[in-house]
Image (cartoon, rainbow, N blue to C red):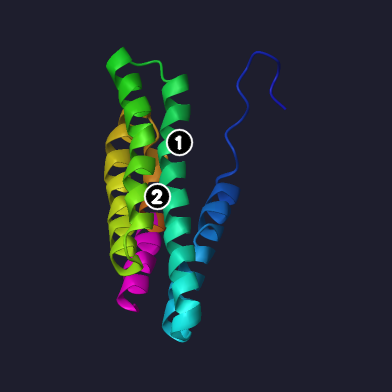
């Protein structure tokens, strides 16, 4: 435990990596399910995959609100975190309202866009150590959306 007034030690990166990888389970499971089930269950799996992708995109935006609150750099950089922080949610929402084959593609592209934006913001915030993991998670999550869409 850190002494009072000091920041807590950085979390064990093994746990962070394990939790990130565990977050891929619904992506892979639901995308696989889309290829293995009949049309009745397929519509449920497509909605479940799209909803999970939209939730993850919103989470990725929310991370920027946390970074914005602790950022000590210039005011415009903090504002950028807050502005981007709401953008993934707003972009994910239409992906839930359009047909799943198109929604999953748009959500997969949104996850890629989130990574591209994070590369810019994470560098400025000194968080580059997470970009490797973010890339791995983005590849699997977005490919799951694209492969799920191709099953429809």
Q: Residue at x 30, y 51 (%)?
A: 110
Mark 1: few, some, or many residues within 10 Å (few <14, many ≥20)? many
State the SS at label 1.
Answer: helix
Marking on residue 134? 2
* Residue 77 showing in the rendered view: yes
Q: Quadrant of residue 77?
A: top left
Q: Residue at x 45, y 65 (%)?
A: 47
Residue 24: % across, % down: 49, 61
Vertical arrangement, residue 76 with respect to residue 30, above or below = above
Marking on residue 62? 1
Q: Residue at x 56, y 59 (%)?
A: 22
| CA–CA distance in space, label 1 to label 2 | 15 Å
Circle 1/circle 2 CB separation < 8 Å: no
Mark 2: few, some, or many residues within 10 Å (few <14, many ≥20)? some
* Residue 74 showing in the rendered view: no
Residue 82: % across, % down: 37, 26
Vertical arrangement, residue 13 with respect to residue 142, above or below = above
Report the span colored magenta: 138-152
Q: Quadrant of the N terminus?
A: top right
Vertical arrangement, residue 8 with respect to residue 120, above or below = above
Tell me if residue 141 is in the magenta stretch: yes
Q: Residue at x 34, y 55 (%)?
A: 95
Q: Quadrant of the C terminus?
A: bottom left
Vertical arrangement, residue 118 with respect to residue 36, above or below = above
């Amino acid at each position: 435990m850190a002494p009072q007034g000091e920041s807590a030690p950085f979390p064990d990166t093994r746990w962070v990596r394990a939790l990130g990888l565990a977050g891929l389970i619904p992506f892979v499971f639901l995308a696989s399910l889309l290829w293995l089930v009949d049309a009745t269950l397929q519509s449920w799996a497509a909605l479940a995959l799209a909803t999970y992708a939209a939730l993850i995109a919103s989470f990725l935006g929310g991370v920027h609100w946390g970074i914005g609150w602790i950022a000590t750099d210039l005011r415009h950089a903090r504002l950028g975190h807050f502005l981007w922080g709401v953008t993934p949610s707003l972009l994910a929402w239409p992906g839930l309202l359009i047909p799943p084959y198109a929604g999953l593609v748009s959500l997969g592209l949104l996850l890629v866009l989130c990574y591209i934006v994070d590369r810019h913001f994470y560098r400025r915030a000194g968080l580059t150590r997470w970009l490797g993991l973010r890339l791995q998670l983005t590849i699997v999550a977005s490919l799951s959306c694209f492969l799920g869409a191709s099953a429809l």
